[in-house]
């Protein structure tokens, strides 16, 4: 029994010495050093990696994209100036016609008969004036008789001119070159001045009409070039402004402008929708920053400048806005470094590291 107690005491002593040795020789963590390392890690984690740009003067173009419509250069609904039965239609639907070309006609038989009667009287009236003039030279008739014959001749000629004008009204002729549309009447139908025969459209050139915001009123002037695209076509076409409206629309606060497109190949048709792109104005020696660099808070616009490794806010006044940049009228100077990434995380005095500077 004593033997077992003896060996048990020895075992306890051995285990105790072993534990003491391990505690003595195993290295212990230095609490002070650990705290410093944690502080360094925390400080490092508070440094924000950002991108920035160097402010420099440049030329900004005030670009504008709006929608518009193609209009015919000229268009008219064709109708007769007089009433009557249509005796002939002399055009093919959808065909090109030329100015002065006869398109349709109504019955003019009574007018033609009246014209022949008056023209036969004209010869007699002319002969009477000739004889009266010869007799007056011999003092065989009075001057009043000659004047009466001359008056009758003049009145007869006026009646003939009137009849010819009435006959002309029975003919429907093209007022300009263009494409004639679908006809709305047939031969034998009775037509009046309110009857639409067809529509004539001039498509060379075409007018391009669009509206811009009122701030461009007076900026875009005749002669300026614009570009536009049409749905279904990949190529960009050019047109020139030829006229602007005389006032701004008070309801829409827009300003209407028209341009001319040659349409020499006749491929485009009026009524099509187009997308218009044009440069309204250029601003030289302007200061601008990428739009993502601007932070707006409580109605105040600002950017963050990189100064000595920290971010410092600067209040700005904005000017022109393009697709990717914003003009800055006040608040920054050439050579300033403006932070363009991570702006929502930035605070005054925030420590930053520049990944890149453009």
Image (cartoon, rainbow, N blue to C red):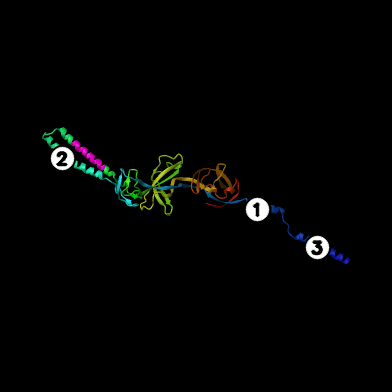
Q: Residue at label 3?
A: 15
> What crowding class fits label 1: few (fewer than 14 Cα within 10 Å), some (14-19), or many (20 or more)?
few
Q: CA distance from mark 2 to mark 1?
A: 125 Å
Q: Which mark is residue 114?
A: none
Q: Earlier in the sequence, mark 2 or mark 1?
A: 1
| Secondary element type, mark 3 | helix
- Name the outermost residue toward the right: 2
Q: Is residue 344 left or right of residue 23?
A: left
- Residue 180 or 297: which is nearer the viewer? 180
Residue in view at x 18 percent, y 36 percent: 150
> Of the residues tagged 2 and 1, which is closer to the observer?
2
> What crowding class fits label 2: few (fewer than 14 Cα within 10 Å), some (14-19), or many (20 or more)?
some
- Residue 311 or 347: which is nearer the viewer? 347
Q: Residue 68, image x and y in percent?
A: 43, 47
Which secondary structure dominates the residues rendered in magenta? Answer: helix
| Secondary element type, mark 2 | helix
Q: Which mark is residue 41?
A: 1
Q: Earlier in the sequence, mark 3 or mark 2?
A: 3
Q: Earlier in the sequence, mark 3 or mark 1?
A: 3
Query: Considering only vertical position in the picture, is 11 above or below 146?
Result: below
Query: Considering only vertical position in the picture, is 311 above or below 11?
Result: above
Q: Residue at label 2?
A: 127
Q: Is residue 273 left or right of residue 164?
A: right
Q: Which residues are magenta?
A: 150-165
The N terminus sits in image quarter: bottom right
Q: CA distance from mark 3 to mark 2?
A: 162 Å
Q: Are marks 2 and 1 in contact (CB under 8 Å)?
A: no
Q: Residue 222, image x and y in percent?
A: 39, 44
């Amino acid at each position: 029994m004593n033997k077992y107690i003896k060996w048990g005491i020895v075992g306890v002593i051995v285990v105790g010495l072993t534990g003491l040795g391990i505690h003595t020789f195993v290295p212990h963590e230095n609490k002070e050093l650990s705290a410093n390392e944690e502080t360094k890690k925390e400080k490092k984690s508070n440094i924000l990696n950002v991108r920035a740009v160097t402010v420099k003067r440049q030329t900004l173009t005030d670009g504008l994209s709006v929608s518009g419509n193609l209009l015919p250069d000229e268009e008219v609904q064709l109708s007769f100036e007089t009433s009557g039965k249509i005796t002939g239609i002399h055009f093919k639907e959808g065909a090109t016609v030329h100015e002065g070309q006869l398109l349709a006609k109504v019955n003019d038989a009574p007018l033609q008969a009246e014209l022949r009667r008056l023209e036969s009287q004209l010869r007699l009236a002319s002969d009477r004036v000739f004889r009266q003039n010869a007799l007056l030279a011999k003092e065989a008739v009075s001057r009043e008789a000659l004047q009466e014959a001359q008056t009758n001749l003049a009145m007869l000629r006026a009646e003939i001119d009137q009849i010819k004008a009435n006959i002309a009204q029975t003919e429907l002729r093209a007022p300009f070159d263009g494409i004639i549309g679908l006809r709305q009447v047939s031969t034998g139908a009775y037509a009046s001045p309110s009857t639409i025969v067809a529509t004539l459209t001039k498509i060379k050139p075409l007018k391009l009409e669009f509206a811009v915001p009122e701030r461009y009123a007076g900026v875009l002037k005749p002669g300026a070039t614009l570009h536009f695209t049409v749905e279904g076509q990949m190529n960009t076409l050019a047109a020139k402004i030829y006229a602007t409206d005389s006032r701004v629309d008070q309801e829409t606060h827009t300003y209407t402008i028209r341009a001319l497109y040659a349409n020499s190949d006749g491929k485009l048709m009026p009524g099509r929708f187009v997308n218009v792109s044009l440069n309204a104005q250029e601003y030289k020696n302007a200061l601008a920053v990428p739009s993502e660099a601007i932070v707006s808070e409580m109605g105040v616009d600002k950017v963050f400048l990189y100064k000595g490794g920290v971010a410092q806010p600067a209040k700005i006044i904005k000017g022109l806005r393009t697709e990717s940049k914003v003009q800055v009228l006040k608040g920054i100077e050439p050579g300033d470094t403006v932070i363009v990434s991570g702006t929502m995380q930035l605070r005054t005095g925030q420590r930053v590291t520049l990944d890149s500077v453009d």
